[in-house]
Amino acid sequence: MTILISLAYLVAAVLFILGLSQLSSPKSARNGNLTAAAGMVIALGATVPLLHFTTAGAVIVAIGIVIGVAIGTVGARIVHMTAIPQMVALFNGVGGGAAALVAVAELLHFGVHPAFSLVLPSVLSIVIGSISFAGSMVAFAKLQELMTGTPITYPGQQVVNGLLAAAIIGFAIAVLAIASIPFSFIALMVLALILGVAFVLPIGGADMPVVISLLNACTGLAVAASGFTLNNFALIVAGTLVGASGSLLTKLMSDAMGRSLANVLFGAFGQVRTAATAAAGAAGRSVRSASAEDLGTLLAYSQRVIIVPGYGLAVAQAQHAARELADVLEKRGVEVEYAIHPVAGRMPGHMNVLLAEANVPYEQLKEMDEVNDDFKNADVALIVGANDVVNPAARSTPGSPIYGMPILNADQAKNVIFMKRSMRPGFAGIDNELMYDPKTVMFFGDAKDSLTKLVSAVKAA
Amino acid sequence: MNNELLNELTFFVLAIFVGFEVISKVPTILHTPLMSGTNAIHGIILVGALVIAAGAKSPVEIILGLVAVALATTNVVGGFVVTDRMLEMFKGRQPAKPATPVEAKK
């Protein structure tokens, strides 16, 4: 029987790996997710013979599953595509919380002096799982705008966080070396929860995706640690896969923002921001703006238009309107492409998801490296709700917080239409030179309304 | 160090390498679905939650077990469903094409 269970776990592990590798192509990605889900079903099925149900145990398992299925299905079904990042944060957090609770239950079970090889992973699982849970909840609250998305800082913050970390290490040593008693490991969990909150508070809303990715990797490691505690192969392998892939993804995401992970996590960004805004805001230069009719004519008689979508498009739910504009332009023989910056939207790939929702064929979606040389041949770069990702300061102003970030070369197009709600700066909180460029025309308004106006203007042209 | 622990460490180290290897080939456009997909996979903690919940006797064990199962199930179900929702929207030219002639007829 145990051999069969082990074999089933092996099959599940293989399916997880295959699923992840299928996720590497848009064509097989959906199957990849289903493959991984099949692995999950097999792993869960194989676990059933391992369970020795008490009456109470059977009842709580049933209730717990019903609650989880209800929240998971409803949450995942009703969420707007723009709210995906915070949903991922939420689902990640609950996983971390579960890992910590499993470790607590195991420690209660082990008694006062368990083997080091059991208590060490339990302690790691409690600490990492709790940080992941609390941190993810703060990330969720920031993205859902339940609390301010700006970094929350106070004097001595690093010292407080350092003391929390030191206290956690102290209690961890107490549990490991002195006695594994509830007082110590509950204290450990509470302190780790507080650290999770304290750690994410000073990080701005725009950086949350990187944080969520990091916490996702953390949850994976907490799960792997629980696997060592329970001697469970499936938990170790699946948890580690997520821990490793999540760490790499976190690095890729911060690379795409042109910053180091340490810079994202420890808030240097927020401090530079205030100074830069103050300096640039004072300039008060004028910009050009134009009517929808003029812009419609410009677009309709172009040969090549590159649309640069940003978060403003997502917020306004304007992806369908953007596609409509692309359709009417294509009908007139205009070549239309979408230039997708790696961090457009709220996460790498987020914009692709939103545009895919509007049935934009992914062949039209061009990644930054692919499209950057095309801008100089484009008649119009149509910037919809993007800002920092087309800010030439990233190339030209060494003092700027975004200096060094790879950007889209929208400024090289023959004309630039900059659609924005207002002159307000983007997430980085800095002014954008491109708006003052003589070939740039500003078109103010909600992205969806503005695009709809342009659609009618192009049709009339 | 006993044999079982040694085996577990071996799996752990190999899985790290596989995790890095698998993901390094994923294009940027799929990073969000990938993050969501890996997020669903660590819902495997449900296995652990089931083990502790099934054998629960004391009130403390019952509460821990119940909460752990509910949280882990949310992770698994929500994770896979939301990933599937994202991915069902990735379509090529073919599914998009039929929409255009229909519009043209109107």
Image: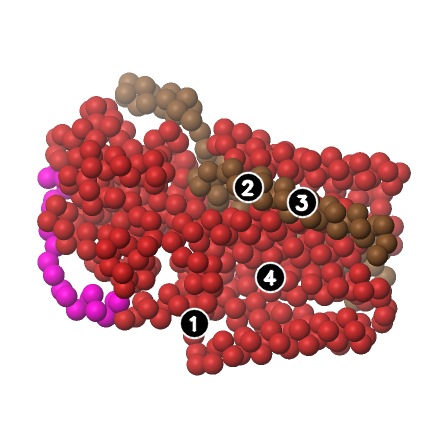
Q: Chain A's colour?
A: red
Front residue (pair A265, B104): A265
Whether residues under marks 1 and 4 lie with C-beta atoms below 8 angstroms apart, the answer is no
Cα separation between marks 1 and 4: 19 Å
- Have a look at marks 1 and 2 and say if they share a chain: no
Q: Quickly name the residue at label 1.
A: A152
Answer few, some or many: residues within 10 Å of disc 4's Cα (few below 14, many 20 plus, some between 14 and 19). many
Please state, as top left, top right, bottom left or bottom right, where the N terminus of chain A lies in the image: top right
Q: Quickly name the residue at label 2.
A: B23
- Have a look at marks 3 and 4 and say if they share a chain: no
Whether residues under marks 3 and 1 lie with C-beta atoms below 8 angstroms apart, the answer is no
- Have a look at marks 3 and 1 and say if they share a chain: no
**Subunit of label 1:** A
Cα separation between marks 3 and 1: 37 Å
Answer few, some or many: residues within 10 Å of disc 1's Cα (few below 14, many 20 plus, some between 14 and 19). some
Where is B79 relative to B65, above or below?
above
Q: Quickly name the residue at label 3.
A: B15
Can residue A289 be found in the magenta stretch?
yes
Q: Residue at x 59, y 61 (%)?
A: A132
Q: Which residues are magenta?
A: A276-296
Cα separation between marks 3 and 4: 24 Å
Where is A122 relative to A160, above or below?
above
The location of residue B45, given as percent across then percent down, is 70, 51
The location of residue A98, given as percent across then percent down, is 68, 57
Mark 3: which amino acid? Ala
